[in-house]
């Protein structure tokens, strides 16, 4: 067993109105040094030893992320006992 | 025998009843299709209606695109069967890879509910042949994730091939592009014009008693011409 993290972010050229709203809220609360916020998604997966890196890429690129608007990274975190 | 048009129901679908009603108004027989059943029951065309399938979990339309019925719809659509996706149905067709691009959160971050003017940009397709060239139609629109986006090259290809079906038009504070959609695109179609998707709701505009106009009926009459029976 292993823990895998998949992080999904919106492509730089795609409008992220949620990120812009968060940036505006940060400015209102005095954090004026923040110049950009992009909101994304984080997935924690527990996978058994049969799952290859190629399969994880397929999962990320076909379901967890939409390649039209998002990019993703797959990171194997640690082996899990059991 | 009247033509049979399937209307899919997913968990969270809202507009299957109105879509079936629009099919009936046009003179076809609506056939209920279920998300978990891959059987399309011999229908001549399919409408993927609006709503919040699977609660919009992950991304709007992403989970529904993997449902058993959609595998059958994808196969049938690639074989030439007409398919219309409305609102969440449009999002599902994009997630299923039947139409290019994606629908993201409205630029205003607001759920927008209003009657919207659209221009019919191509009247030579399966779902728009009954409209006059350049016709402007008024239909309801109601969504939070209706902002159409695609790469510039994809947008150029859509425009060049006449695949922009509907564009947001109209002047005034509550008209024009409502959500930041690229190039004011409200709806698009496949290269052969048989697979179409749009964010506004033609199925809610089929009778002045219950909608702003009956402009939406044109899509349903159009497909009947295509599948061989005239209404």
Image: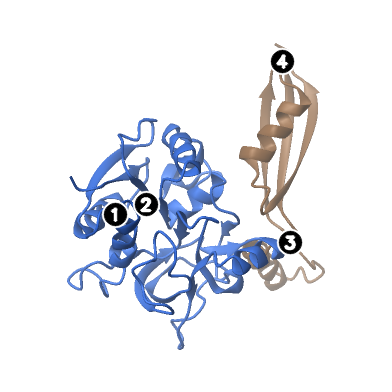
Chain colours: A brown, B blue
Residue labelled with disc 3: A37
Cα separation between marks 2 and 4: 38 Å
Q: Which mark is residue A50?
A: 4
Cα separation between marks 3 and 1: 40 Å
Of the two numbered discs 2 and 1 on the same chain, state the one appearing first in sequence.
1
> Looking at the image, which residue is at 75% across and 22% down?
A52
- Label 1 or label 4, whichever lies nearer to me, is 1
Which of B155/B176 is in front? B155
Residue B185 falls in which quadrant of the image?
bottom right
Same chain, labels 3 and 2: no
Cα separation between marks 3 and 2: 34 Å
Crowd around label 4: few <14 · some 14–19 · many ≥20 (10 Å): few
> Looking at the image, which residue is at 80% across and 68% down?
A35
Same chain, labels 4 and 3: yes
Crowd around label 3: few <14 · some 14–19 · many ≥20 (10 Å): some
Same chain, labels 3 and 1: no
Residue reaching furthest to the top? A82
Cα separation between marks 1 and 4: 44 Å
> Looking at the image, which residue is at 64% across and 65% down?
B155
- Contact, mark 2 vs mark 1 (Cβ under 8 Å): yes
Residue reaching furthest to the bottom? B172
Residue labelled with disc 2: B49
Tag 3 secondary structure: loop
Tag 2 secondary structure: loop
Q: Which mark is residue A71?
A: none
In the picture provided, is B2 more to the left or to the right than B69? Answer: left
Q: Read off the chain for label 2.
A: B
């Amino acid at each position: 067993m292993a823990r895998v993290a998949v992080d999904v972010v919106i492509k730089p050229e795609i409008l992220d109105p949620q990120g812009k709203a968060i940036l505006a809220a940060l400015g209102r609360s005095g954090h004026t040094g923040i110049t950009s916020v992009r909101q994304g998604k984080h997935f924690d997966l527990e996978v058994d030893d049969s799952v290859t890196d190629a399969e994880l890429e397929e999962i990320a690129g076909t379901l967890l992320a939409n390649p039209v608007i998002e990019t993703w990274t797959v990171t194997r975190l640690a082996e899990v006992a059991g | 025998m009247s033509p049979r048009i399937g209307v899919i129901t997913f968990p969270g679908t809202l507009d299957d009843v109105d879509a079936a009603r629009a099919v009936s108004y046009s003179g076809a027989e609506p056939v209920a299709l279920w998300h978990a059943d891959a059987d399309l029951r011999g229908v001549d065309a399919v409408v993927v209606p609006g709503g919040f399938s699977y609660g919009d979990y992950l991304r709007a339309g992403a989970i529904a695109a993997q449902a058993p019925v959609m595998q059958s719809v994808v196969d049938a659509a690639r074989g030439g069967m007409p398919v219309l996706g409305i609102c969440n149905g449009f999002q599902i067709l994009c997630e299923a890879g039947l139409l290019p691009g994606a629908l993201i959160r409205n630029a205003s971050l607001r759920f927008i509910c209003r009657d919207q003017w659209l221009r019919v940009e191509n009247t030579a397709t399966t779902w728009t042949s009954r409209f006059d060239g350049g016709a402007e139609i008024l239909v309801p629109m109601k969504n939070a994730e209706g902002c159409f986006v695609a790469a510039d090259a994809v947008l150029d290809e859509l425009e060049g091939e006449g695949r922009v079906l509907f564009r947001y038009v109209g002047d005034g504070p509550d008209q024009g592009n409502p959500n930041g959609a690229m190039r004011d695109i409200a709806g698009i179609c496949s290269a052969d014009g048989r697979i179409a998707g749009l964010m506004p709701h033609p199925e809610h505009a089929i009778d002045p008693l219950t909608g702003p106009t009956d402009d939406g009926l044109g899509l349903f009459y159009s497909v009947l011409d295509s599948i061989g029976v005239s209404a």
